[in-house]
Image (cartoon, helix red, strand yellow):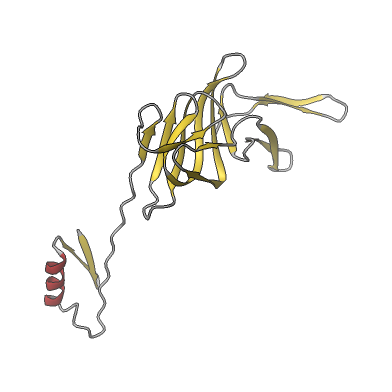
Amino acid sequence: MWFCGVGSKRFGLAASAGALCLALACAGLLSGCGSRALFSSRPERPSIVQIDAARYKGKAGKIILPVKGDSFVYLYRTDTRKQTPYQLTSKDGVFKAPVGKYQLLMYYVTSRDRGRRGLMISGRYKKPIAVSVSRGSTYRLKAGPPITASVQVSQRGANAVTMDLLLTGCGGEQCTISSKEPRFRVLSKAGKVLQEGKFKYG
């Protein structure tokens, strides 16, 4: 469906290219005397290609996530016109990617800590990671532990501050860890506990 805007009116035309030109000519919009016709059409976004490492049989290389567990990585092709998005899934952090060039944006993994407790880690890169995949190649992604924690403190009013817990993975990615809410403790220079509590998600 194409829409043509003329003054304050709007006409909907469902037609082939030839019929559309004929309709415009009859309406006097293609007279070439300074009148203007505007058309808009939203390009369709390419659908996400999902590839399971256990099932894919085509020509591929490997992308390895150092954190083991049920996981996926999200990336998109850069050597095609459409820049098709891909989601690669794996049970052990070893993914299969079709031969091509990609930009890797993020990962997500469900794993376990040393106490065998369930742990979900996601990481998003500030700058996409360029990955070139050839047949039989292996790319080892820098991601996950060791994770560096820092606290960002912002002034809120005369007598209040907010504290945000920031987590950064070894690849420089911004991490989110879903487990028990982490605790914090504020100490004075003398070591006295001034405040303690939990960080809240969201």
Give the quadrant of residue 54. top left
Residue 108 higher or lower than 17, as above or below: above
Q: Is 56 situated left or right of 128 in this image?
A: left
Q: Please tell me which residue is depicted at 59% across the width and 19% down the height of the picture.
A: 113
Q: Which quadrant holds the N terminus?
A: bottom left
Q: Is residue 161 visible?
A: no
Most distant residue in the right direction: 190
Nearest the viewer among 163 and 142 is 142
Please state the horizontal and vertical placement of residue 17, each as a whole percent of the image.
Answer: 16, 66
Residue 185 higher or lower than 165, as above or below: above
Please state the horizontal and vertical placement of residue 49, each as a whole percent of the image.
Answer: 35, 40
Most distant residue in the front direction: 136
Q: Please tell me which residue is depicted at 22% across the width and 83% down the height of the picture.
A: 32
Q: Is 23 situated left or right of 4 in this image?
A: left
Please state the horizontal and vertical placement of residue 84, each as a whole percent of the image.
Answer: 38, 47
Residue 23 higher or lower than 135, as above or below: below
Please state the horizontal and vertical placement of residue 87, each as a whole percent of the image.
Answer: 41, 37
Q: Total of numbered circles in the picture?
A: 0
Give the quadrant of residue 150. top right
Q: Please tell me which residue is depicted at 29% across the width and 63% down the height of the picture.
A: 40
Q: Is residue 105 visible?
A: yes
Q: Is 78 situated left or right of 125 in this image?
A: left
Give the quadrant of residue 135. top left
Residue 33 higher or lower than 16, as above or below: below
Q: Please tell me which residue is depicted at 33% across the width and 48% down the height of the picture.
A: 46
Q: Which quadrant holds the C terminus?
A: top right
Nearest the viewer among 73 and 135 is 135
Most distant residue in the top direction: 115
